[in-house]
Image (spheres, helix red, strand yellow):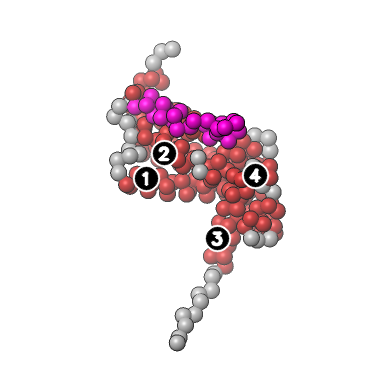
Amino acid sequence: MATTPKLRRTQEERTAQTREALVNAAIEVIHQSGYAAASTTAIAEAAGVSRGAILHQFGTRAALMAEVVQAVYRREVEIYAEILSVDSFGHRIYDWPKILLEVLGRPAGVAVLEILIAAQSDSELDQAVRISQADVEAASLHSLQTNLGGDTETALAVKQLMVWAVRGLTLANRIMPGGVDMAASVALLSGLLKMAAPQGRVDELQPILRSPD
């Protein structure tokens, strides 16, 4: 019986698969053991490759972490698009705290949070991650305005409120004994946004930023 010959992977495919394996391994190690434990040796072992593969593909550990930030965001965009394609959920601003909790609370989201925190005391990491994170912030702001309207000032304020509220809760849940009730806090934030913007549009929140103290 004739057998179908195996197609050999191209160099480009092998490179892409190695980079993805290293990104996934970095996420796994950081989520399980924390950023400090995510050495190039530990990541290489988790990925099933040599430590030299990290140096070959990324040059430095910091560059790998910058790629993790970018790769996670690309994956999150796909998740958001899938959520939005199912039904009306996600088409109102007050839906998003719950969506963000589901997405940013995943191991990949936790890993990115730990990388961002670590960058505050690591100049090399900060320099590598800063550009990646700036790109992520700009892209997410554009997406928010495209889908839910609002001027840049208001959209940025509401995005930062939701994202960092969820990230803060995720961090608290990780470090507080017994964790925290993230769902209750997120439900409260969603409820407050619904009261302020009953139609679910960002521009409904603009008067709040412009109101006198």
Question: Mark 1 against mark 3, which lies toward the viewer?
Answer: 1
Residue range corresponding to the magenta coloring? 168-194
Q: Position of residue 146 (x, y in %)?
A: 36, 39
Q: Is residue 178 left or right of residue 36?
A: left
Q: Is residue 193 left or right of residue 133?
A: left
Decide which of tag 2 and tag 1 comes sooner along the chain: 1
- The count of marks equals 4
142 in magenta: no
Residue 99's tag is: 2
Q: Mark 2 and 1 residues: CB-CB less than 8 Å, in contact?
A: yes
Question: Mark 4 against mark 2, which lies toward the viewer?
Answer: 4
The residue singled out by tag 4 in the image is 33
Label 4 crowd (10 A; few <14 / some 14-19 / many >=20)? few
Residue at (47% x, 83% y) in the render? 3
Q: CA distance from mark 1 to mark 4?
A: 30 Å
The residue singled out by tag 1 in the image is 83
- Numbered disc 2: secondary structure: helix
